[in-house]
Each structure stands twice: as C-alpha cells, then as structure tokens.
Image: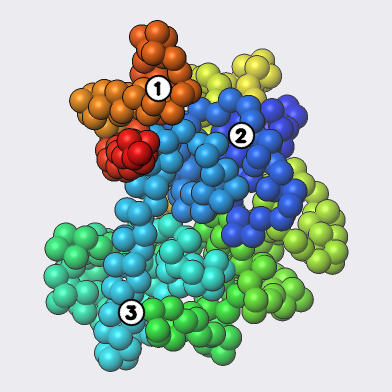
Amino acid sequence: MARPLSSVPPLSEGASPEWKLLLACARTRLDQAHRDRIRELLQGPVDWNRFISAASRHRLDSLANRHLAVEAAGAIPAGAAITLETLVRSRGRHSLLHAGRLIELVDLFRSAGVAAVPYKGPTLGALAYGSFALRSFVDLDFILPQRDLLRAARLLTAQGFQAYPDPTAAEEAHFLARFHPGQYAFISPSKQLQVELHTENTLRYLPVPLDWEGLRRRFIQVSFGGRQVQTFSVEDTLILLCVHGTKHFWERLSWICDIAELVQAPRGVDWELGQDLARRAGCRRMWLLGLSLANRLLDAPLPSAVRAWMEADSQVQRLLPEGGLALRTHLETKPAALVFGSEKHGLGKRDLSHCDWVLSIPTEEVCPSMNLGQAVALCCYEVARRARPTPQLQTPATAAAEHRDRIVTMLATVLEDSGFTRPQARASQLLKVRRLVNRLRLAPQDARLLQGMLRQIQWKLDQP
C-alpha cells in the first residue's frame, strides 16, 4: 500500500477541474451544494477528453451523464455530450444483458442445490443505487462454500464456459490443493460473459474465514428485473466491499461510491452489528477505512458514533490520504517517477527522503519476496495496463454545404422581403447570414426543419 513520507493533501484539494467535477457527480443524490459545485466548475475550463476518460476508467460515466444532462444542459460541448452518451448507452446494454444472465445463473445454481450467492454487479446496483443500470460492472460475482465449488464449476462448463483455472481438471488438482487463486474465472465467448466464483479459500484477504451459517441467517432479498434475488445483508456487504477495496488499494473511485451509496440505502445499516461483525472477521480497520474514504471524498453521512470510532483509530487517520487512488490521481495530472534501489541494498534513507510515497507489493505466503526485475516489471505492467486510450470526442454530423447555402439564400430573401435589410446591402448581409448559419453547425434534420419554416414564412410574405 502507498504510505506518505510527507503530507499528502485530500484528493479534492489541488486536483484538476476534471477530477473535482467527477467527485461532484459520483453520487445518486445531488443536494444544492453539489449542484452549485457542478455549475461553478463548468464555468471554468474543463478538458472533456480527460473528464470522460476518468469517468469511464472509474466506471462512473452513468452517474456523470445522469447529472450533467440535467444540471449542465447546454454547457457541455456537443461532441463531449455525444461521446459520454454513447459510453453510457453501451454500458446500459451490457448491464441489462448481464442482469438477465445473473437471473439465469441464480436459477441454475439453485436447481442443482449450489449455495452460490451473488454480490457486487447488478445485485449491488439494485441494493445500493436503486437501479442496476446506475452501477457499472464487467462480470458477475458469486460467493459460495468451497465444498460447492466443483459442482458449480461443472455446471458452468456444461453451459459452455471455459474455466481459468479449472478446479475440475485432474492436472491442476495438485496445484489448487496447495494454492488458491484470487478467484475462479469462467468465460463464455458466445455469451460475452465472465463469471467469477469466490470461496472462503479465495477470499484470503479476510483474516477470518467466512462464517457461512451466520451469513445465511442474515441473507436479504433484492428486487430487479421483476425477480427477487438473495444476497448478503447490508452489514455483511459493507464488510466485503471494504476488504475488496483495501485489497486493491482503493484505486477506483466507484468502489468508494459503492460504500457511500450503500450506507444511504433505504434498508438502513445496523452500525453496532456491523462493527461487531467486522471485529469478529478481523477486518474492523479495513471497514473503518472504507467508511472514512466514503465520508471524506463523497460526503457519505455517518452517525456520530461511527465517526468517533474512525477518529479513535490513529492508523485509519494515517491511511486516509493514502491508497492507490491518491497515487493514481497524481499520475493522471502530473509527471511522476518510479524509483528503485539496487538488488543488494535497496533504497537508502537519503533516497527515500526525496520520495512522496513508498509502494509495497503484496505477495503470497508460499513466495513472500520477489527480485528487483520482477518488481520493476510488475510496476511497469500496472502503469501500462492503466494507460488506456482517451476516448476522442465525437463530432456531430452537420448539414451538407448545399443545404446550408440554400438556408442562407432563403433567409436573406426573407429578411429583405420583410424589410429587415435594404436591397443595396444585400451582399454584406448575405455574408453575415452565411457566417451565422455556419456557426450554428446545424444537424441535417435541423436544416430540413429550418428550410420548411423559411418556405412557410416566404409563402406568407408573398400573399397579397
């Protein structure tokens, strides 16, 4: 995890206008203060390519588009609006398709007696956001007991999924008996779908194995697509999300948004129960850190007792400015360098005094260290993996030149016949009208409408 060697300001301070705008949009509910904030930011310069790229990368483009369409209508360049709308429509189709696939898989597992429980994905969208369409996701996640893993894997492979790794393959059995992956991925190219199965063995960042009996007693039902789907309680889901975010160093803002929305869900949160469950699971500090980030970055409302718990934990306060998200924000807006020491001696105190962050790479117990070349390769891979191409703004289609010329001629004639311009000034007026029409960048359908309006006006002027 990244830990600061010097004071690191809050992520909203000194950040780019694009990042501040994304923070303001990263919520389902806008109060007046955030509406004013969005409008204030839109009065200044905004790099729309950068904003859309960040919104897409942090998977918050649906929320951004939802709020900007209402609060900033007309303030966004047409090309940016089209690009953002295109991304959101594509993601919406993906969400709708995957929600249907989730229901199919829930029925499949239930019919075979496999206790697979969906979480994150459309289930979390319905629970925390009120609609699965507002939460972006790329795969479907299920948590199930380790004892049900083989049956679940056979069910998915029978449906045409390819397993990575395959727990049913004899040649992989010896390896998987000693080493548990972070998840079991199942991919179906024909369905354009990836399913990830998690068990108490793969969720190894939970210090204490899952208590399945306790989890089962707290199951709740969420509704989407006209169906009731069973999932984890709000309190258990918060713990799972906080551990997941900490595992990935909180590098994606949408993970923090999930927590901010879940604590405001209509079902409410039993905070005493949540703290007790987090303590028994050995992850109370991860839980408090996730809640702190949601409160600090996205103004998630928390009871005074919860805020007191956070303030009483000095380690949570120390970790607050840190995490992959802080480092990622810096890399998106400013130049940065990765500094590595020698294989033998590493970095000395003098070297470290010039660094803003120290990075540590989590390893497995069976292989607790790595050499310098591996560390460099891993860091460079992460930088390259995140360097996605910035979506370019789409230029909206405009009317053909011949249609614009026809509009200019018709408009100049109407202005002259109505007495607005004098015949002797027709040449100069025609030039001004042409410039005006070109600046309007009329869409083809608008050009046709305007020509019809001008014909009707001209016909009326020609009447005796």
Density class for disc 2 (Cα within 10 Å; few <14, some 14-19, many ≥20) is some
Name the image quarter holding the N terminus.
top right
Q: Give the camera-side residue of 401 and 450.
A: 450
Density class for disc 3 (Cα within 10 Å; few <14, some 14-19, many ≥20) is some
Q: Earlier in the sequence, mark 1 or mark 2?
A: 2
- Residue at 33% across, 79% down: 103
- Residue at 60% across, 55% down: 27
Nearer the observer: mark 3 or 1; the answer is: 1
Q: Earlier in the sequence, mark 3 or mark 1?
A: 3
| Residue type of the residue flagged with mark 1 | Glu
Name the image quarter holding the C terminus.
top left
Q: Earlier in the sequence, mark 3 or mark 2?
A: 2
Work out whether 444 lies above or below 409: below
Q: Give the camera-side residue of 238 and 342.
A: 238
Q: Indicate the position of residue 117 as horizontal and vertical percent values.
A: 42, 79
**Helix, strand or loop under label 3:** helix
Judging by the rendered image, the residue that carries numbered circle 1 is: 416
Q: Indicate the position of residue 95 as horizontal and vertical percent values.
A: 36, 63
Quick check: can you spot residue 374? no
| Residue type of the residue flagged with mark 2 | Leu
Quick check: can you spot residue 409? yes
Query: Disc 3, disc 1: CB below 8 Å?
Result: no
**Helix, strand or loop under label 1:** helix
Judging by the rendered image, the residue that carries numbered circle 3 is: 103
Q: Quadrant of residue 160?
A: bottom left
- Residue at 39% across, 52% down: 88
Q: CA distance from mark 3 to mark 1?
A: 66 Å
